[in-house]
Image (spheres, rainbow, N blue to C red):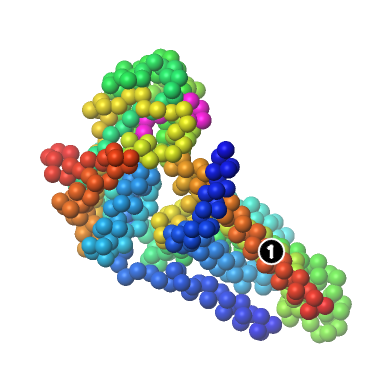
């Protein structure tokens, strides 16, 4: 009996101490970011470059922008890298972030079924397109998850003069999930959906979907990065976190961002130097 | 068509021995086995004690543990998340978004299964062999080791059920692990991620690998118990 128990204990210790679990790297930071930066593959491109230069491992937890900011608020991340300027400024204003720095932008595209029931394909006017969708009651998938894309979508409805909370019917479907899940759902239901271009370009299950509206300046999508405030959360890795923030907006980091391409198409456009971005 | 692509993706993954993929598989196996072992170390004695002890509220405890077998993983994950978050009571441990948190979450899910099934097995054995054990001087908790040993094959099945629950769940490990590439990404969270990226064949391929893995572990456990049965008579 004794031997059985000690065997069990030994096995347990072995498993727990097995390779990988025990090997915590010397230096790492946790970055809470959005599903778009992760699903588009941008981090897969950037992080090895950053690690090679600084030796700092970056652990990315990808969530919707609202959730990613909450993760920073609770002090569960060292750096927050998201895309919803108003929410970011609120985060810094409340003292949870040190300083928001603009990093890059990409743009949103309105994806829809090839059958185009709202008749908006090729339009460059997002407001008119959304009005047509609402008038025709064409199926529309909303992220519904407080993400950056979700808040951008809500802003665009407002821009089109539509009070979506009051007018939404069964055609407007809030799924409360990430960008990829929303695209999968839209594909399955032949619905329209607002997506960031990066996720769309790297999305593999397009089926019957295509871009219906793009190129409207109001579809620009700005990303910002900020260090979680060490004054609020003393355990935040200030030096290493700041090193990542600084690298993203440095000439080298900005160049790395512009070099990330899928199928020859650039996904993110660095603009750290642009005033007011 | 998708299934064909998925099968070739699964075979490709298993043949390629890609380090990233192997890392995911080995993390998944280590996390789940650790959780099952922890649950066994705590749950086997605890279940046996509940089987033999008589105390006020015992019926309620038994019902509660039986009900916890159905604890939704996402709820377990959320509860643990709030405990382990930097603003939570266990925040200073710094466990959130690490494999340790994932082991803790899976242990919480497996433990009720081990305790509940052990309680049942030991109680039945106790009713059957009570007189015999008492005549050998094994009364009360002193009978526990013998009862556990006699019930070992049923208990192994309980542990396998626990293993199945742990290896199949995604909700809890996603919340407390964060699905960090190369660090806390396991089979199920990788499947969820590939699905959201729209790479359905790869997602399904990963699922097939997970099934093969589960099958292999169950086969090993079954074989071991058969061999054990032959020697133990």
Magenta region, residue range: A187-196
Viewer-closest of B66 and A222: A222
Q: Is residue A272 magenta?
A: no
Spot occupied by residue A9 in the image (x, y as percentages of width and height)? 58, 78
- Rate crowding at label 1 as few (under 14), some (14 to 19) or many (20 or more) other CA atoms within 10 Å: few
Q: Can the viewer see residue A175 in this picture?
A: no
Q: Position of residue A121 (x, y in %)?
A: 36, 20
Q: Does any portion of residue B108 appear in the rendered image?
A: yes
Pick the quarter of the image with the C terminus of chain A.
Answer: top left
Picture layout, residue A153 above or below residue B224: above
Quarter of the rendering containing residue A224: top left
Q: Is residue B212 left or right of residue A196?
A: right
Image quarter hosting the N terminus of chain A: bottom right
Quarter residue A12 falls in: bottom right
- Mark 1 falls on what kind of element? helix
Task: Say which residue appears at 25% left-offset and 25% top-offset.
Answer: A216
Q: Residue at x 33, y 35 (%)?
A: A197
Mark 1 chain: B
| Residue A33 located left or right of residue A247 | right
The image position of residue B74, as x and y in percent, is: 53, 50
What residue is drawn where x is 81% and y is 71%?
Answer: B126
Mark 1 lies on residue = B219
Q: Is residue A107 above or below residue B160?
A: above
Q: Number of labelled discs?
A: 1
Which residue is drawn at the image coordinates 51% and 64% (left, top)?
A: B26
The x, y position of residue B160, in whole percent, is 67, 62
Task: Decide which of A55, A260 is in the foreground and name it.
Answer: A260
Measured along the vertical axis of the image, is residue B58 above or below residue B200?
A: below
**In the image, is B45 to the left or to the right of B125?**
left
Q: Pick the residue in front: B9 or A258.
A: B9
Residue A188 sits inside the magenta stretch:
yes
């Amino acid at each position: 009996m004794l031997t059985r128990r000690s065997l069990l204990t030994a096995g347990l210790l072995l498993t727990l101490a097995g390779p990988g679990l025990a090997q915590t790297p010397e230096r790492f930071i946790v970055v809470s970011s959005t599903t778009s930066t992760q699903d588009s593959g941008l981090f897969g491109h950037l992080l090895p470059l950053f690690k090679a230069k600084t030796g700092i491992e970056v652990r990315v937890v990808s969530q919707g922008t609202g959730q990613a900011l909450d993760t920073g608020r609770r002090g569960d991340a060292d750096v927050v890298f998201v895309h919803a300027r108003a929410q970011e400024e609120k985060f810094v204003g409340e003292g949870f972030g040190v300083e928001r720095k603009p990093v890059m932008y990409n743009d949103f595209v309105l994806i829809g079924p090839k059958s185009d029931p709202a008749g908006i394909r090729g339009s460059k006017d997002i407001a008119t397109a959304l009005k047509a969708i609402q008038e025709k009651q064409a199926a529309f998938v909303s992220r519904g998850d407080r993400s950056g894309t979700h808040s951008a979508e809500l802003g665009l409805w407002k821009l089109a003069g539509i009070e979506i909370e009051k007018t939404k019917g069964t055609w407007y479907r809030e799924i409360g999930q990430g960008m990829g899940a929303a695209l999968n759902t839209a594909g399955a239901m032949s619905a329209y959906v607002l997506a960031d271009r990066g996720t769309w370009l790297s999305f593999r299950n397009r089926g019957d979907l295509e871009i219906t509206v793009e190129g409207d300046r109001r579809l620009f999508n700005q990303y910002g990065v900020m260090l979680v405030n060490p004054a609020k959360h003393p355990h935040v890795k200030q030096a290493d976190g700041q090193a990542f923030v600084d690298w993203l907006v440095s000439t080298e980091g900005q160049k790395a961002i512009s070099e990330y391409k899928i199928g020859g198409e650039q996904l993110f456009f660095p603009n750290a130097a642009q005033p007011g971005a | 068509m998708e299934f064909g692509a998925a099968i070739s993706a699964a075979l490709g993954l298993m043949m390629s021995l890609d380090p990233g993929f192997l890392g995911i598989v080995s993390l998944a196996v280590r996390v789940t086995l650790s959780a099952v072992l922890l649950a066994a170390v705590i749950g086997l004695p605890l279940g046996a004690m509940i089987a033999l002890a008589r105390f006020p509220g015992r019926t309620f405890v038994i019902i509660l543990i039986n009900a916890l077998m159905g604890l939704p993983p996402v709820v377990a994950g959320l509860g643990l998340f709030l405990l382990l978050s930097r603003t939570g009571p266990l925040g200073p441990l710094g466990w959130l978004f690490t494999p340790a948190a994932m082991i803790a979450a899976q242990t919480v899910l497996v433990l009720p299964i081990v305790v509940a099934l052990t309680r049942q097995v030991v109680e039945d054995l106790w009713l059957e062999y009570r007189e015999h054990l008492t005549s050998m001087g094994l009364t009360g908790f002193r009978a526990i080791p013998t009862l556990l040993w006699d019930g070992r094959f049923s208990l192994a099945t309980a542990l396998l059920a626990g293993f199945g629950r742990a290896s199949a769940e995604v909700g809890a490990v996603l919340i407390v692990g964060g699905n960090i590439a190369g660090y806390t990404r396991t089979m199920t969270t990788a499947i969820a991620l590939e699905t959201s990226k729209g790479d359905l064949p790869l997602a399904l391929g990963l699922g097939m690998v997970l099934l093969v893995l589960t099958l292999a572990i169950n086969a090993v456990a079954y074989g071991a118990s058969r061999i054990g049965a032959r020697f133990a008579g």
